[in-house]
Image: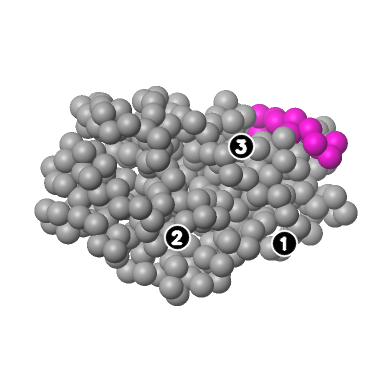
């Protein structure tokens, strides 16, 4: 099922933009010249182990991101999780300025400002750390920018945050935007692709990932460009199920059709999803909702299938 915990609080803004978020739809800007290279995302990184990558979302409102670094393969010693995702920052709307603003709640802020103890230790283990961006019931979302200028302004905030805190990339989760609130537009076809295009220009060497869900999942191409030109990975959003994200341009090695909720998906289902992932040649397996409870036995069921090794837990 979808993630449930969401943020409602006062706005703490990281703003580097001076343009309005929303302009009349007739003002939609043209695409960049077709002469510009589209496939300009960084080369996919080599996995730390044979069998593909494991990606884990952590609800940092209630759990430590450092829990992701406590699990290694018993054979070989590599980290179980290749990518840890801070869940979640928000895209908010400032009603006074008409701008989309990046908001980090106190728990997310705590992780970021304490990067030396919360982020760097994971990176030192060879893991990548991303910040997930989520809607926040204010009408602002990834799919209703109506100009490239506005999309670029929000992309700048994301890139500035990733660079300042030494993050390895940004993850997009198009849930809970409540499009239409505050009189804001409904989703359009150009917005998400423009946002991805602008963010990739600002983060040529960092990871961009997409949680395959929401209005953005059906708005992945526009103006001769497609989301797969800019994102590195995409994963299924329905926990306990197997469904291949339909992101044109991404190879099997960059897709996670299997998604599990660590707290609610059964061992047998998790194992079955791992078997399908391996047999069908996909390169990513998605985990959600890691807590401080030792889950190495549960993880071992999947790891033995994907990596040929059980998992060791080191508190």
Magenta-tinted stretch? 179-191
Mark 3: secondary structure: loop
Question: Residue at horizontal 63%, vertical 63%?
Answer: 106
Q: Secondary structure at mark 2?
A: loop
Mark found first going from the N terminus, 3 or 2: 2
Left or right of residue 107: residue 167: left
Give the quarter of the image for residue 32.
Answer: top right
Residue farthest bottom in this picture: 116
Residue 188 % position (x, y)? 70, 30
Image marks 3 and 2: residues in contact by CB distance under 8 Å: no
Q: Measure the C-alpha gap from mark 1 to mark 2.
A: 23 Å
Q: Tell me the quadrant of the picture where the C terminus can be found.
A: bottom left
In the rendered image, which residue does mark 3 sit on? 175
Q: Is residue 36 visible?
A: no
Dot 3, crowdedness within 10 Å: few (<14), some or many (≥20)?
Answer: many
Upstream in sequence: badge 1 or badge 2: 1
Asked if the residue at tag 2 contacts the one at tag 1, i.e. Cβ–Cβ closer than 8 Å, the answer is no
Residue occupying image coordinates x 79% and y 59%: 18
Image spot of residue 153 (x, y percent):
70, 54
The residue lying furthest to the right in this view is 96
Chief secondary structure of the magenta portion: loop
Q: Is residue 255 left or right of residue 304?
A: right
Residue at numbered disc 2: 64
Residue 141 higher or lower than 118, as above or below = above
Q: Nearer the viewer, residue 202 or 58?
A: 58
Q: CA distance from mark 1 to mark 3?
A: 20 Å
Q: Residues within 10 Å of mark 1 (few under 14, many from 20)?
A: some
**Residue farthest front in this picture:** 293
Residue at x 51%, y 72% (from the top left corner): 114
* Residue linked to disc 1: 13
């Amino acid at each position: 099922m979808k993630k449930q915990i969401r943020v409602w609080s006062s706005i703490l803004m990281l703003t580097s933009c001076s343009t309005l978020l929303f302009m009349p739809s007739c003002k939609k800007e043209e695409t960049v010249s077709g002469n510009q290279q589209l496939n300009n995302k960084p080369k996919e990184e080599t996995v730390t182990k044979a069998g593909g990558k494991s990606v884990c979302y952590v609800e940092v409102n209630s759990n430590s991101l450092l829990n992701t670094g406590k699990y290694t393969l018993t054979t070989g010693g590599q980290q179980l999780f290749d990518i840890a995702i801070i869940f979640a920052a928000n895209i908010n709307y400032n009603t006074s300025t008409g701008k989309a603003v990046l908001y980090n709640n106190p728990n997310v802020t705590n992780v970021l400002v304490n990067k030396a103890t919360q982020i760097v230790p994971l990176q030192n283990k060879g893991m990548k750390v991303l910040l997930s961006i989520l809607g926040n019931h204010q009408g602002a979302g990834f799919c209703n920018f109506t100009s490239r200028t506005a999309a670029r302004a929000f992309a700048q905030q994301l890139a500035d945050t990733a660079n300042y805190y030494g993050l390895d990339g940004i993850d997009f989760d198009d849930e809970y935007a409540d499009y239409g609130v505050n009189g804001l537009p409904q989703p359009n076809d150009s917005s998400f692709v423009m946002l991805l295009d602008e963010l990739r220009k600002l983060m040529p060497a960092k990871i961009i990932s997409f949680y395959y869900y929401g209005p953005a999942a059906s708005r992945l191409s526009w103006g001769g460009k497609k989301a797969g030109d800019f994102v590195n990975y995409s994963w299924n959003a329905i926990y306990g199920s197997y469904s291949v994200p339909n992101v044109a341009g991404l190879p099997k090695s960059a897709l996670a059709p299997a998604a599990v909720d660590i707290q609610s998906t059964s061992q047998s289902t998790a194992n079955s999803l791992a078997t399908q992932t391996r047999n069908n040649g996909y390169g990513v397996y998605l985990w959600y909702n890691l807590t401080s409870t030792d889950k190495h036995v549960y993880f071992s069921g999947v790891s033995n299938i994907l990596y040929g090794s059980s998992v060791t837990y080191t508190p």
